[in-house]
């Protein structure tokens, strides 16, 4: 039996289907035909539906608002009724699936850092909240509650939340990110670091275990990162040219050491060893490094990689001997960069020596060197006085 036309109306059409039920439809403002999402048991119900749809169109015209079709409203209702993805679940998946600019998975240490920030700063407030229910007031209240005495932690937490919610926009979970606080994403001011003097570097090296003394000299005079030093092998020391070939670095995520490329593409570099440091490295190779190109320069007790905490425990005693309890191991790299700037290294030269991708950090070391311009001027006069 064919569907029969019950009749045309001033607005819309009603048809009686072979099943005996009624179907209603109309031509909308978009000039497309729209069917009711359901069929009706009797004609009166179909008439009521058309009447209500006509009212919606008329009201949208009066209010000068966008009209939404029955299909759009049905989809919105479906989405509203669907189970909501919680922020905690989405954030955990975001870390697992996140890719860098090259399309590669995040490094293990980066994932570890993100998870620590997520667990400590984001999960307590947002973990059980649906992603699309996080509002700007929620974000502002959360940010205001963070400890202002730890600005770097606040900045990292805000940056992670912003990145996750920006991805939620890309994934069409939300229409716009609620993470917008002016100035909250600005880089936190780093703690001031007073570089070690050459004499202090020597004292610290002398007060390390003999097998680790050269590590202090490499960190301070060659400005290598700890992960680069811990992965140095005999084959990375260019004996002919007195250079360190930085090709790899080690990180220490949960589960054990992971060897990979340096922190950035610029991290792959050849670092010239100052002449006064070369004999120390040469002696270290002869005395403490096993034969074979893959032998580590500074292995741990089990001949594997030496964890940062182990090196740090020795360095704590060495820095105390030098009267520099304020120094951290990474400050040796800062010292090496500042010393290079003080002897006239350009921004480009510093950037290449340090393995930085941009010139921003290198410029910071040049600024630090300029702060000591008065001392340089005085030393120039002292040099002239000695010649007289």
Image (cartoon, helix red, strand yellow):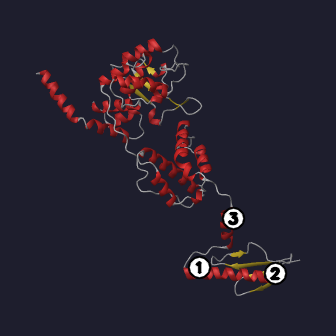
Q: Position of residue 56 (x, y in %)?
A: 64, 79
Whether tag 3 and tag 2 are in contact, CB under 8 A, the answer is no
Residue at 39% x, 33% y is: 354
Q: Position of residue 361 (x, y in %)?
A: 37, 39
Of the numbered discs 1 and 2, the one sitting upstream in the chain is: 2
Whether tag 3 and tag 1 are in contact, CB under 8 A, the answer is no
Q: Residues within 10 Å of mark 1 (few under 14, many from 20)?
A: some
Q: Disc 3 marks which residue?
A: 78
Residue at 63% x, 73% y is: 68
Residue at 61% x, 50% y is: 90
Compare residues 85 and 225 and report the one nearer the observer: 85
Q: Which mark is residue 42?
A: 2
Q: Disc 1 marks which residue?
A: 60
State whether residue 67 appears in this view. Answer: yes
Q: Nearer the viewer, mark 3 or mark 1?
A: 3
Q: Residues within 10 Å of mark 2 (few under 14, many from 20)?
A: few
Up the image or down, 230 lies above or below 192; here it is: above
> Residue 214's image quarter?
top left
State whether residue 359 appears in this view. Answer: no
Can you name the residue that lies furthest to the right here? Answer: 1
CA separation in Å, label 1 and label 2: 28 Å
Can you name the residue that lies furthest to the bottom here? Answer: 10
Please indicate whether residue 194 sits to the left or right of residue 76 in the image: left
Q: Residues within 10 Å of mark 3 (few under 14, many from 20)?
A: few
Secondary element at image label 1 = helix
Can you name the residue that lies furthest to the top here? Answer: 287
């Amino acid at each position: 039996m064919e569907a029969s036309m019950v009749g045309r109306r001033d607005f819309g059409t009603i048809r009686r289907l072979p099943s005996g039920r009624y179907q209603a439809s109309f031509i909308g403002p978009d000039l497309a035909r729209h069917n009711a999402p359901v069929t009706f048991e009797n004609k009166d119900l179909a008439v009521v539906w058309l009447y209500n749809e006509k009212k919606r169109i008329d009201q949208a015209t009066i209010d000068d608002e966008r009209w939404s079709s029955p299909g759009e409203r049905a989809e919105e209702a479906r989405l509203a009724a669907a189970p909501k993805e919680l922020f905690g679940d989405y954030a955990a998946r975001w870390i697992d699936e996140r890719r860098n600019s090259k399309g590669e998975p995040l490094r293990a240490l980066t994932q570890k850092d993100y998870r620590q920030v997520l667990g400590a700063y984001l999960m307590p407030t947002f973990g059980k909240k649906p992603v699309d229910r996080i509002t700007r007031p929620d974000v502002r209240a959360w940010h205001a509650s963070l400890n202002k005495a730890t600005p770097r932690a606040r900045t990292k937490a805000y940056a992670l939340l912003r990145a996750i919610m920006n991805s939620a926009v890309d994934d069409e979970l939300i229409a716009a990110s609620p993470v917008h606080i002016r100035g909250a994403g600005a880089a936190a001011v780093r703690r001031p670091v007073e570089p070690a003097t050459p004499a202090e570097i020597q004292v610290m090296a002398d007060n390390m275990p003999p097998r680790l003394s050269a590590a202090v000299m490499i960190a301070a005079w060659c400005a290598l990162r700890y992960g680069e030093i811990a992965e140095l092998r005999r084959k990375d020391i260019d004996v002919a040219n007195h250079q360190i070939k930085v090709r790899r670095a080690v990180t220490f995520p949960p589960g054990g050491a992971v060897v990979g490329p340096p922190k950035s593409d610029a991290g792959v570099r050849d670092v010239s060893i100052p002449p006064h440091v070369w004999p120390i490295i040469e002696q270290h190779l002869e005395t403490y490094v096993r034969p074979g190109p893959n032998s580590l320069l500074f292995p741990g007790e089990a001949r594997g990689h030496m964890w940062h905490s182990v090196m740090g425990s020795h360095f704590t005693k060495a820095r105390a001997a030098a009267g520099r309890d304020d120094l951290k191991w990474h400050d040796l790299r800062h010292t090496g960069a500042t010393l290079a700037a003080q002897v006239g290294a350009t921004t480009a030269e510093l950037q290449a020596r340090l393995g930085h991708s941009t010139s921003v950090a290198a410029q910071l070391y040049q600024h630090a060197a300029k702060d000591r311009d008065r001392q340089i001027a005085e030393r120039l006069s002292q040099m002239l006085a000695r010649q007289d």
